[in-house]
Amino acid sequence: MNRNIYILAATSFVIVALATPFQLFSVPLAPIAAIVLGAGAGWWMISNSTEQGGLNGLKAGAVVGAGALLGSIVGLAVLALFVGNIPEVQTYVQNSEPNPEARIPTEWIAPLGALAGVVVGFVVGLFDLVLSAIAGFVAGALNHSTHPTHA
């Protein structure tokens, strides 16, 4: 791995962290970013390598996908923590339990929301990681096959 792959992984982290909340509104910006950056990493890796086109592309895409996974976790955890601190949301959550003894204390709602954001972000981020790795593999294999000097 070279430094540029890690720069793409950090870029993936930032873009996906900022774009993941939009997925709640059916705007797939984070998966598109994961695919584009994973493919770019796979292409870049093979451009600077002489062996194992698809495999090196897969590795580079997976590194960028790991950045997307972490970005997804952070993006949804921060969003859930922010939403959990809104007084109207806290009231809604408490009133959703009909039994007053079983209601969640107000001070627990934001941290539990953040924990739920971490779990959901991990699941969504795994999808981004897989997309990025596949895109890196495909881009690496295509770039390897178009450069006969790599054979």
Image (cartoon, rainbow, N blue to C red):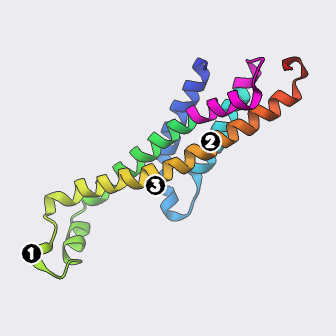
Q: Which stretch appears magenta?
A: 45-63
Q: Secondary structure at mark 3?
A: helix
**Is 75 in front, or is 99?**
99
Circle nearer the N terminus (1, 3):
3
Query: Residue 2, relative to residue 60: is it above or below?
Result: above
Number of other residues with Cα within 10 Å of mark 1, as a class: few under 14, some 14 to 19, many 20 or more:
few
Mark 1 sits on what residue?
101
Q: Is residue 33 visible?
A: no
Q: Secondary structure at mark 2?
A: helix
Q: Residue at x 55, y 25 (%)?
A: 6
Instruction: Give the residue at the far left of this rendering.
Output: 101
What percent of the width, then of the height, locates residue 16?
51, 44
The C terminus lies in which quarter of the figure? top right
Number of other residues with Cα within 10 Å of mark 2, as a class: few under 14, some 14 to 19, many 20 or more:
many
Query: Residue 61 colored magenta?
Result: yes
Query: Residue 103 colored magenta?
Result: no
Name the amino acid, label 2. Ser
Circle nearer the N terminus (1, 2):
1
Name the amino acid, label 3. Pro
Mark 2 sits on what residue?
132
Q: Quadrant of residue 55 in the image?
A: top right
What percent of the width, then of the height, locates residue 37?
63, 37
What percent of the width, then of the height, locates residue 116?
33, 57
Q: Residue at x 24, y 69 (%)?
A: 88
Image check: 150 left or right of 135? right
